[in-house]
Image (cartoon, helix red, strand yellow):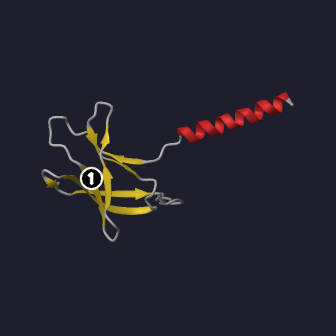
Amino acid sequence: MKRFKLTIGFAILLMNVWVFCSAAPFLVSDPYPATDNQPDGFLVVEQGKPDTPVPLAKTAENLNYFRWDLAGVSKGTHNLTIYAESATWGRSDPVPFVLSIGILPPTNIRLTK
């Protein structure tokens, strides 16, 4: 009985560690230097889909950067355009980004002579 309780306890511990250690994928930028103009937020645009506003993320040093959670993005290839936005200077130049999620390389490809 004692062995059974230890096994159950260990299984529960492993499940809790797995839940807390699993990480969602994120698309991130380098932090903006403190001396540069700072954005108020970001905008992710994908053709045919609603624009996605992304709030600022902050580093431990309180520097702003882009951090977008990709957990809700569907599998496939996505052609994105990302903008930094500010009430002071408006919208930045577009930054194109191609994102491929869940697409595996072809298998069973062989070279022959």
Where's residue 79, x and y in %?
32, 62
Outermost residue to the bottom: 48
87 left or right, relative to 70? left
Query: Who's the residue at 27% across and 52% down the image?
Result: 42
- Looking at the rendering, in which quadrant would you find the N terminus? top right
Label 1 sits on residue: 42
> Residue 45: x and y, percent?
29, 62
- The extreme top residue here reads 2
The answer to which of 24 and 35 lies nearer the viewer is 35
Farthest residue in the front direction?
Answer: 87
Is residue 112 positioned above or below 62 on the image? below
- As shown in the figure, which amino acid type bears the numbered disc 1? Phe
Residue at 40% x, 58% y: name it: 100
What is the quadrant of residue 96 in the picture?
Answer: bottom left
Q: Is residue 47 visible?
A: yes
Q: How many marks?
A: 1
Question: Against 87, is 22 above or below?
Answer: above
Q: Secondary structure at mark 1?
A: strand
Spot occupied by residue 92 in the image (x, y as percentages of width and height) = 17, 54
Q: Residue at x 48, y 60 (%)?
A: 106
Q: Is residue 75 left or right of residue 7?
A: left
Does residue 30 show up? Answer: no
In percent of width and height, residue 87 lies at 17, 52
Number of residues whose C-alpha sits closer than 10 Å to that of mark 1, classed few (under 14), some (14–19) or many (20 or more): many
- Image height check: is 56 above or below 90? above
At 71% from the left and 32% from the top, the residue drawn is: 10
Query: Is 17 above or below relative to 76?
Result: above
Residue closest to the far right = 1
